[in-house]
Image: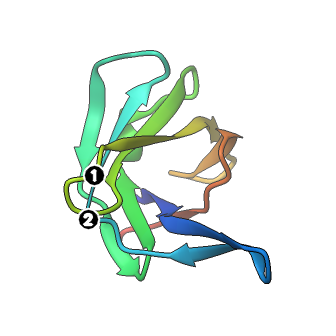
Amino acid sequence: MGVLRVYRDIYRIDFSSVTGQTYTLINASSIVASSFVRNSLTAIETMVPVLESTGIYYVDLNPILYTVSDIYEIRWSVNYVLNSPTKILTTRFKMKPVNFTGGAFVEVIDNQIEIILQNAS
């Protein structure tokens, strides 16, 4: 069975009158992600995101825990710097079946994300 890998970029937004708005990837002081059925308070699974490279994190979702009938959210709890308030970033998605065995398609409803379907060998 494969896993669904969901990526999230963490960045700082800077502005200057010379260069305008710039986005700089940064590593968060702390980050945790949990998935929920939309508008629910009960977590489906809680994951510790993996830092792939500066500012780029991912979590692997267990596709067995998700159905095509619900809309889901990943709530990323992020502290950008030590002792800063926690910021909740939300990614909404819906599962859709595809025509090959064990496959799934993720329809992103809100917030652009990058998803890779990986088959475990």
Q: In the image, 32: left or right of 11?
A: left
Q: Quadrant of residue 28?
A: bottom left
Q: Residue at x 64, y 48 (%)?
A: 105
Q: Position of residue 76 (x, y in %)?
A: 39, 46
Vertical arrangement, residue 118 with respect to residue 70, above or below: below
| Of the pair 59 and 105, the residue shown nearer to us | 59
- Disc 1 is placed on an element classified as loop
From the image, tell me which residue sits under label 2.
29
Amino acid type at circle 1 is Ser
Q: Residue at x 54, y 21 (%)?
A: 70
Vertical arrangement, residue 86 with respect to residue 3, above or below: above
Q: Quadrant of residue 30?
A: bottom left
| Of the pair 13 and 75, the residue shown nearer to us | 13
Q: Quadrant of residue 31?
A: bottom left
Q: Residue at x 63, y 40 (%)?
A: 97
- Number of numbered callouts drawn: 2
Question: Which quarter of the rendering shows the C terminus?
Answer: bottom left
Tag 1 near tag 2, CB within 8 Å? yes
Q: Is residue 119 visible?
A: yes
Q: Between tags 1 and 2, which lies in front?
A: 1
Q: Residue at x 65, y 45 (%)?
A: 111
